[in-house]
Amino acid sequence: MQILATSGGFLPDGRYGAKVGPILTHAIDLAGAGPRPRVCLLQTALGDDQGAYARGYAAFNRDRPDVRVSHLALFPMPNIPDIRGHLLAQDVIWVGGGSVANLLAVWAVHGLGEILRQAWEAGVVLGGVSAGSLCWHVGGTTDSFGPDLRPVTNGLGLLPFSNTPHYDSEPGRRPLYQRLVADGTLPAGWATDDGVGLHFRGTDLVEAVADRPGVHAWRVERGPDGAAVETSVTPRLLPGARVV
């Protein structure tokens, strides 16, 4: 039962659009799947944007031709007849970023919450970036409703914490997240700077990892005086990490 909740994954590539980054490689390594790992991409949070899927396939075909990559699209209808069977046959399920509110609503219609829980319990590594990080938690902060950040509290709750990605790159995230934890709207949880991932085994944090130096994970909880307390965690730098 493993989850890699991140603010990273695919990396931008000026020539090809995207490349498989160290964090996504780490998710595959965690699966311990042998020479032909299976990875399924979900871009529900982008409305199953076909360009995002095309970039993902191209990146895997170029950088990791050993991976048997597939995707699950739900618009305009599921592209896979047996969603449960397909997802449970994967080694890694990787969820892209976008609107976490829309993602959760669409998943609910298709019963994906229970299917993904079954996949997690069966040993499939669940992972993702941004919306694909927050979704596994109780809730967090989101721009799903517009530029003014708001809380979301109906995450899948596989991890009994709150979560906020992009902690260093979107200035409004930090003060809002701290306020929501302090006033009890969200439970204590974890935030990640861009390029950082949180590896959970069951509901226990194993470690924080990063694809670049100088970034952190953050534990945010309510202190005895009712104010939010923030504690930084220095992540382990992954092989192939960028030097900046």
Image (cartoon, rainbow, N blue to C red):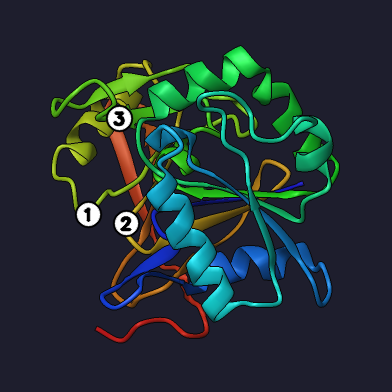
Pointer 1 with pointer 3, Cβ within 8 A: no
Determine the residue positioned at 61% across, 34% down.
159
Residue pointed to by mark 2: 193
**Image spot of residue 202 (x, y percent):** 73, 44
Q: Residues within 10 Å of mark 3 (few under 14, many from 20)?
A: many
Tell me how far mark 1 sits from mark 3, CA to CA: 15 Å
**Does residue 147 appear to the left or right of 98 in the view shown?**
left
Residue pointed to by mark 3: 142
**In the picture shown, does residue 237 fall above or below 125?**
below
Secondary element at tag 1: loop
Please state which of residues 74 and 117 is positioned toward the viewer in this rendering: 74
- Which of discs 2 and 3 lies nearer the camera? The answer is 3
- Which of discs 1 and 3 lies nearer the camera? The answer is 3
Tell me how far mark 1 sits from mark 2, CA to CA: 5 Å
Secondary element at tag 2: loop
**Does residue 16 appear to the left or right of 9 in the view shown?**
left
Tell me how far mark 2 sits from mark 3, CA to CA: 15 Å
Please state which of residues 82 and 172 is positioned toward the viewer in this rendering: 82
Report whether residue 48 is seen. Answer: yes
Q: Residues within 10 Å of mark 1 (few under 14, many from 20)?
A: some
- Considering only order in the chain, which callout, 3 or 1, is on the residue closer to the N terminus? 3
Residue pointed to by mark 1: 168
- Considering only order in the chain, which callout, 3 or 2, is on the residue closer to the N terminus? 3
Three-letter amino acid code at the position of disc 3? Thr
Three-letter amino acid code at the position of disc 1? Asp
Three-letter amino acid code at the position of disc 2? Asp
**Image spot of residue 95 (x, y percent):** 53, 45
Q: Quadrant of the C terminus?
A: bottom left
